[in-house]
Structures are given as structure tokens and as C-alpha cells.
Image (cartoon, rainbow, N blue to C red):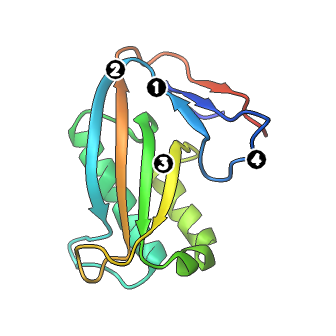
Amino acid sequence: MTDTPHRLVNPGDLPRPVGYSHAVSAAPGRTVHVAGQIGEGPDGVPAGIAEQLDLACANVVTALRAAGGEPEHVVSMQIFITDVEGYRAASKEIGEAYRRHFGKHYPAMALLGVAALFHPRATVELVCTAIIPEDDGQSSTEGERE
């Protein structure tokens, strides 16, 4: 179970999701589109994929909070990556970095391998959509497997 106002849907007929939800039924509210965020901090862009994802997640949360939202309001996330094999190899560290910012909230996600990103040192870019609910009521999970 996750603490989100949105309904995370993971039907038993589909493979068990790991680190994402198959579908999200968003609660009524205000839509926030977070532009592509790379792992760039005050000291620039670090070399490692996990370090870049950590900063990119922090940047998403900063932008989202500036718009009045919270990490649990994210309903969709696209992860653009220039090194899919490197992402797989660093999956444990990437999972830890993700959970530092989003906890165990896993929205609908897609990982997309791309040839390059605009910033020459960037290997990860996150694009998110969040719905800030009108009523921050009870969370709901449908068909969630433990």
C-alpha cells in the first residue's frame, strides 16, 4: 500500500510490476507537467547513472513542490536513459536513489533508451505528470500484490 490519493492499478492478469504500476487512475485535481529534469546540481552533472538519477529525482520534487505538489501526486513518469545496460547494472543503487525522493510510490512509468540528451554529460532525464488532488483523501490500491 502506498500513501497516494490516486488509485494504483495492478491487475493479477498482468506480470507483477517491479518499481512501477501498470495503470494509475488519477484523483480529480490540478494537473502539473514537470519538464525534463536531468541530474544537474550546483556542482554540475556527476558521472554515475545512479548519482544522476538521484539529482534528477531531487529536481523533479523541487519543481513539483514549487507548483504545490508532492511526490505522491506523480501519476506518470518517463525515464529517458542513454545507457540502458548501465541502468540495469546500477538498478539496486537506482532503486535506493528513487526511494529517497518518492518512497514506495510507483506511478505508471516507462524507461526509454535514447541516443543522447541535450546536455552532453546527462545520461538520465525524467519527465513527470502529477495531479494535485482537490481532496487529499484516502489512498487506494487496486489489485496490488504483496
Q: Position of residue 47 (x, y in %)?
A: 38, 85
Q: How far apart are marks 4 and 2 (CA)?
A: 30 Å
Q: Mark 4 or mark 2, which is nearer to you?
A: 4
Give whichever of discs 3 and 1 has the lower sequence position.
1
Give whichever of discs 4 and 2 has the lower sequence position.
4
The residue positioned 29% from the left and 83% from the top of the image is 121
Relative to 62, is 140 above or below? above
Name the amino acid, label 2: Gly
| Circle 1 Cα neighbour tier, 10 Å, few/some/many (<14 / 14–19 / ≥20) | many
Please tell me whether mark 1 sits on a helix, a strand or a loop.
Answer: loop
Please tell me whether mark 4 sits on a helix, a strand or a loop.
Answer: loop
Name the amino acid, label 3: Phe
Q: Position of residue 101 (x, y in %)?
A: 45, 53
Q: Mark 3 or mark 4, which is nearer to you?
A: 4
| Circle 2 Cα neighbour tier, 10 Å, few/some/many (<14 / 14–19 / ≥20) | some
- Kindly identify which residue carries mark 1: 26
On residue 102, which mark appears? 3
Name the amino acid, label 1: Ala
Q: How far apart are marks 2 and 3 (CA)?
A: 20 Å
**Circle 1/circle 2 CB separation < 8 Å:** yes
**Circle 2/circle 3 CB separation < 8 Å:** no
The residue positioned 28% from the left and 57% from the top of the image is 36
- Kindly identify which residue carries mark 2: 29
